[in-house]
Amino acid sequence: MEYIFETKNLRIRKFETQDAQRLYENHLEEEVKKWIPNESYADIEETREAIEFYAECVNNKHFPFVLAVELKESGELIGDTGINEVDGNSNEVEIGYTICKKYSGNGYATELVQEMTKYICETFGVNILYGRVMHGNDASVRVLEKNGYSFTSEEFGAEDDPYGKGMLIYRKEC
């Protein structure tokens, strides 16, 4: 298997068709649905289609650029990470990440965001990265802050904020 980059505990790679069941299950977890409710898949078929789309984007190095996150120790798919351009501006991207509940609290998200940020800056030549976090997702806020992202503003009325509490916007320059 070809890895795009590695961290101390994780391997980051392109998604493969055999990841569909695990990706589907990861995005059914209550914590994932709570903090990124628009990222669930209706069924395995939709998950497979998403994986095919992600793989094509990675192959062609275009957005959205979504990668699988596996634990080095076991090879288990424990999350995902990705970027997408901000409002059609390819010099600014938004980073996203999930680590399934079983593995949260181990510093994996912090480790992932640190290396993903470095990879994005080196590979895509972007100037600015954003992280958008729902109010109340303190763990994700800590991950961004530990990686040098700074709070810039709040956003209200976003379509990916189903609770209407607003999104915290964090920013980091490459």
Image (tube, grey):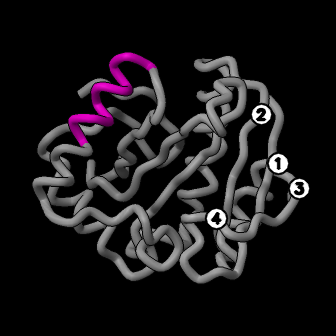
* Image side of residue 66 versus residue 167, left or right: left
Q: Which residues are magenta?
A: 51-61
Three-letter code for the amino acid on which mark 2 is drawn: Ile
Residue 11 position in % (x across, y down):
40, 40
Precedes in sequence: disc 3 or disc 4: 3
Residue 141 is covered by the magenta coloring: no
Query: Mark 4 or 1, which is nearer the eye?
Result: 4
From the image, tell me which residue sits under label 2: 128
Residue linked to disc 1: 148
Identity of the amino acid at label 1?
A: Gly
Circles 3, 1 touching at the beta carbon (< 8 Å): no
In the depicted view, which residue is nearer to us: 67 or 56?
56
C-alpha distance separating marks 2 and 4: 20 Å
Q: Secondary structure at mark 1?
A: loop
Q: Given the image, on which type of amino acid does mark 4 rest? A: Ala
- Mark nearer the N terminus (2 vs 4): 2
Residue at 55% over, 72% down: 105
Separation of marks 1 and 2 at Cα, in angstroms: 12 Å
